[in-house]
Amino acid sequence: MKVVILAGGLGTRISEESHLRPKPMIEIGERPILWHIMKYYSTFGFNEFIICAGYKQYVIKEYFSDYFLHNSDVTFDLSSNSMTIHNNNCENWKVSVIDTGLNTMTGGRIKRVQKYIGDESFMMTYGDGVCDVDLNALLKFHKSHGKTATITMVNISEMKGVLEVEENGMITAFREKEERDASLINGGYMVFNKEIFDYLDSDETILEKGPLGRLSSEGQLMGFNHGGFWQCMDTQREKNKLEELWASGKAPWKKW
């Protein structure tokens, strides 16, 4: 099963670093957070990735193009213009980096990579958040209900998309947070069937507004409850928090 990662936004809320590189390429423990996300999926056996790039997309392409240089010892023989790679630290990954446009919205980015996904169900997440979600359990839950979409629900008091959920997990409303709301929010880490593309119209389509709202009103959106760790990286403060967790050797998302 392919994993689609949204990595094309401007990252304006963490502009201290995103003016130099895309937010998914901001490093935690000297590795891009994008790498951490992919490494986490890989521990569950998901090794084929489609990166929806946009802002400074060449930085992501160059990182994977030079992956051995970033992660292995090398010897350069200038006399023969050759390079020898030592301690080959590579991943069993297939990575497609697709330029989905500079100003394309989230739903539009997914629509642009439809031909790379095909008619399969696929996983999707954002390129700026880590967690310890049981991805096998998430996929099993998605297959069990037969609906078009499943999103992971987390309990965080933050201004994110709010979910109203029935006891069986069916999401009956998807909207912006209000003061009266509890803290159950959309944490990303989604699974979609191919029918999701029927809800994505153009580059202007915002996944979290029209499509997810429409899916919930049609009874086609389900929520997988995750009570463990989840953290996005919207601000420098959140980046520092993730850095501290990684440095402590107790990062909850490190399953490898």
Image (spheres, rainbow, N blue to C red):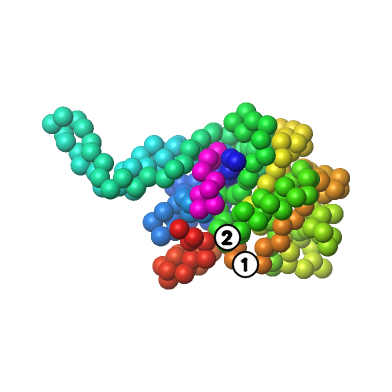
Q: How far apart are marks 2 and 1 (CA)?
A: 8 Å
The amino acid type found where label 1 is placed reads: Gly
The residue under the point 16% across, 29% down is 80
Q: Where is residue 201 in the image (x, y as percent from the top left)?
A: 74, 33
The residue under the point 67% across, 54% down is 138
Residue at the limit of the structure toward the left, as seen here: 79
* Looking at the image, residue 3 lies above or below residue 236: above
Left or right placement of residue 69 versus residue 251 in this view: left
Pointer 2 with pointer 1, Cβ within 8 A: yes
Left or right placement of residue 131 versus residue 205 in this view: left
* Looking at the image, residue 224 lies above or below residue 244: above
* Along the viewing direction, whichever of 238 and 131 lies nearer the viewer: 131
Left or right placement of residue 216 versus residue 16 in this view: right
Which residue is disc 1 drawn over? 228
Which residue is disc 2 drawn over? 131
Callout 2 secondary element = strand
Q: Where is residue 119 in the image (x, y as percent from the top left)?
A: 68, 31
Circle 1 crowding by C-alpha within 10 Å: few under 14, some 14–19, many from 20:
few
Toward which corner of the image does residue 85 lie, by quadrant?
Answer: top left
Looking at the image, tell me whether mark 2 or mark 1 is earlier in sequence order: 2
Segment colored magenta? 42-50
The residue under the point 58% across, 34% down is 100
Can residue 9 be found in the magenta stretch?
no
The amino acid type found where label 2 is placed reads: Cys
* Looking at the image, residue 73 lies above or below residue 77: below
* Along the viewing direction, whichever of 226 and 10 lies nearer the viewer: 226
The residue under the point 44% across, 47% down is 20
Q: Can residue 104 be seen in this view?
A: no
Callout 1 secondary element = loop
Left or right placement of residue 147 versus residue 243 in this view: right
* Along the viewing direction, whichever of 191 and 247 lies nearer the viewer: 191
